[in-house]
Structures are given as C-alpha cells and as structure tokens.
Image (cartoon, rainbow, N blue to C red):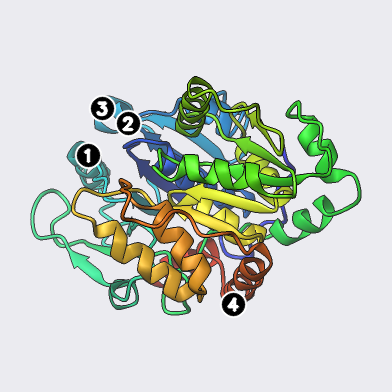
C-alpha cells in the first residue's frame, strides 16, 4: 500500500461518490483516482458503485477495506433505507458521469434530519462530475447551478463540474506526489526493473504501449513498426487491445507472412493504476484510450496517440478535433489521430502516416507544462465545495 502524501490543509469532509460502470472500466478508474486522492489529503470517502470488480486489480486491497480513508459500498445499498439509517450524513455528494443518486438515498437524508429535529438548511454540496472534453462548452458550463425542482431534494441545487485543460475548467486529476514519483522512477534501472516485474526483459528497443479498442488501422500500425529500422517492443494491455492484436497476428500468420523481426509483442497482465502509470512512464510512445489513460499519458509527457471512445452519432469527432486543437498537434500528429480513430477503412483512405516521435514529444511536453501551471482537479474541487457549504 503506497504511503499517502501529507494531508490537505482544508478541514476534512465526508464524501459520497456514486459511480455506475458503463463499460471498459473508465468510469470506475476516474472515480477511484478521485477517491484515493481525496483520502490521501485527509478526507473520508464512501464509493457507491454497481460493479466494483475492477478494483481487485486497479487498487488491490480496496474491496477488503485496506485502503485508508475509502470504503466501497454496493450500489444496491444506496436504496436500502434500513442500511442508510445509521451511517453519518456526508458533506459532499458526487454523481459521476451522469449517474443519478437513488431517490431513496436522498429521501433518507431529508427524513433522518427532520426525524431527529435537526433539519439542516444547508444540504450536502452536490456535484455532477462530467466527462472530460476540450470543447468550448466546457468553459461555459463549468460550475453552473442546476436547481432541483421536484422530489425529496426539491429546493436544493446541484452544480456541474467539468474537468478540462484550461484555467476556466475544473482541471485534471493529479496527485500531489506525482512529480516526485516520476523523478524517482527516472533513476537508473527503474524502468528495466518495472518491466521485469511484468515478465518483460527490456532489450533497449523502442517501447510502445498499446491500450485501445479495435482500430481498423491496427494492422497498419504493426506493419509500420515491423518495417522500421529501429526494433520495437510492443506492450499490449489486457482486454480488448489484446484481442485485437491477436486477431491481426492470426490473420498475418494465415496469409503466410514471414515471422516478425523488428517487432516483439508482449501481452501484459491486468495492471494496478500505479503500475499502469509506470508503464506509461517507461514507454517512448503511448497509445491510450478513453479518459483516465489519456490524462495519465499527458502527465507521462511522452508522445501519445488517443483512441477516443467512438459514438454512433460521430460526436467523438468534434471532441477529438477540440483536443487536437488544444494540444497544438502538428499535421503529422493530427493525421495519425484521424486515421487511428476511423471506424472503418477503405482503399480510398490514406493509411497511418509515418510517426514523428521527436516532434510529438515536444508537443506533449509543451501541453503538459501548461497543465502544470493550473491547480489539479482535486484541489479545485475542494475549493469549489467549501464555497458551497
């Protein structure tokens, strides 16, 4: 269990964080990082989640109650009035990514305070934590109130809280000790030792991490790495990325292609969040997906390629464009992203352009430096909540 950094100077609060796992574990990943960060600053967290299974590997010990300051509760318990009668009332409620707190949970808060003759005219600070985006509406909507017009919480107010990349947003999750941990990891031998713990012998080759969905351009990426004069070790995350790579390799074998020479593929086990950070710090290129891993790749400061979650209405295209604009992506990085994020390929469309890792590294480093000038999400959220109480 990592030793938490010094506690925050703000008064400790009790937080209820609510999370519904839609798919791919991104929601629970962000929620857990938030809970762990707040707990490390001296606060107490109850995480209510409908599927906590991913915490077995994301945060070993969390489900057994071995993570100081955080307790994990089953979502169904938030609807059980009998179980809700005894726990202390929280100072803050966080609805993550549009999930809604159960009516029974809200009603119990109101009923219990009135029954005790201690009706609190100051309800919990109620936060609707939104998805990450670089689109313009984020700055306009961050912090806006949402009055509740019906139900047991009628008359109360939620507030929209938007993570983001600019000073007029809620910032990004970044633990107080992150930079120090990165410096410690940069010491000689740390990268090789970290990879060895995953069963990987680093040969000094270029290291590329792959955490993706099923991009049609995946076969093109493997061909490009194999054709390069510099040897590559490809480190493939567990789950959909591994299934996709195995399918491409099987098709390649079936076609009678010669054995790979310049590309060595490693299939990784499931990693804790801390080990995943170490993976990103180790690699020379990080191919990431979703929200949590994008943020961690930005903090890693290495060249990155983002596989954004595809949406049926193509809303992800505008979101990707906005991110690339903020990032200051040059023509090659933008073209690579657009090709990587196509939902299908055709003979008329160009393949993946050649990578320019030196230029891409400079781009990410500039963006990372601008983010470091901002307060992190947890710090800003604490400031926001204290103003509402």
Q: Nearer the viewer, residue 176 or 274?
A: 274
Instruction: Name the residue tied to disc 3.
Output: 80
Question: Could you tell which of marks 1 and 4 lies nearer the N-terminus?
Answer: 1
Give the mark nearer the N terminus: 4 vs 2.
Answer: 2
Q: CA distance from mark 1 to mark 4?
A: 39 Å
Q: Position of residue 316 (x, y in %)?
A: 30, 57
SS category of the residue bearing label 1:
loop
Confirm or deny contact between disc 1 and disc 2 (CB under 8 A).
yes
Judging by the rendered image, the residue that carries numbered circle 1 is 102
Of 254 and 49, the residue lying toward us: 254
**Viewer-nearest of discs 2 and 3:** 2
Q: Residue at x 9, y 60 (%)?
A: 149
| Residue pointed to by mark 2 | 75
* Circles 2 and 3: CB atoms closer than 8 Å: no
How far apart marks 4 and 3 lie (CA) works out to: 46 Å
- Pointer 4 with pointer 2, Cβ within 8 A: no
**Which residue was labeled with disc 4?**
370
Please report contact status of discs 4 and 3: CB closer than 8 Å, yes or no: no
Q: Position of residue 362 (x, y in %)?
A: 66, 72
């Amino acid at each position: 269990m990592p030793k938490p950094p010094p506690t925050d100077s703000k008064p400790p609060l009790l937080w209820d964080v609510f999370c519904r796992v839609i798919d791919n574990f991104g929601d629970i990943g962000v929620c857990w990082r938030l809970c762990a960060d707040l707990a490390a600053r001296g606060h107490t967290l109850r995480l209510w989640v409908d599927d906590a299974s991913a915490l077995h590997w994301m945060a070993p010990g969390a489900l057994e109650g071995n993570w100081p300051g955080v307790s994990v509760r089953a979502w169904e318990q938030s609807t059980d009035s009998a179980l809700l009668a005894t726990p202390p009332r929280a100072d803050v409620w966080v609805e993550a990514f549009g999930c809604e707190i159960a009516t029974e949970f809200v009603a119990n808060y109101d009923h219990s305070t009135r029954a005790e003759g201690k009706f609190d005219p100051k309800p919990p600070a109620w936060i609707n934590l939104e998805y990450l985006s670089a689109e313009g509406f984020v700055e306009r909507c961050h912090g806006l109130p949402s009055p509740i017009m019906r139900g047991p919480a009628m008359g109360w107010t939620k507030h929209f809280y938007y993570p983001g990349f600019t000073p007029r947003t809620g910032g990004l999750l970044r633990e107080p000790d992150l930079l120090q941990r990165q410096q410690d990891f940069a010491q000689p031998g740390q990268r090789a030792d970290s990879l060895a713990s995953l069963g990987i012998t680093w040969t000094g080759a270029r290291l590329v991490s792959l955490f993706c969905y099923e991009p049609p351009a995946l076969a093109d990426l493997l061909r490009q790495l194999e054709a390069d004069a510099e040897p590559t070790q490809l480190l493939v995350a567990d789950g959909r990325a591994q299934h996709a790579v195995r399918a491409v390799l099987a098709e390649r074998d079936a076609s009678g292609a010669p054995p790979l020479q310049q590309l060595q593929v490693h299939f990784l086990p499931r990693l804790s969040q801390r080990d995943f950070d170490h993976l990103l710090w180790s690699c020379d290129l990080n191919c990431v997906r979703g929200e949590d891993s994008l943020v961690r790749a930005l903090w890693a400061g290495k060249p990155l390629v983002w596989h954004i979650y595809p949406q049926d209405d193509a809303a992800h295209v505008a979101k990707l464009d906005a991110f690339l604009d903020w990032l200051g992506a040059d023509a090659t990085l933008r073209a690579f992203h657009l090709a990587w994020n196509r939902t299908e390929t055709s003979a008329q469309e160009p393949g993946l352009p050649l990578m320019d890792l030196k230029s891409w590294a400079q781009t990410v480093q500039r963006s990372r430096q601008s983010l470091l000038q901002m307060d992190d999400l947890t710090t800003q959220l604490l400031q926001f909540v204290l103003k509402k109480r």
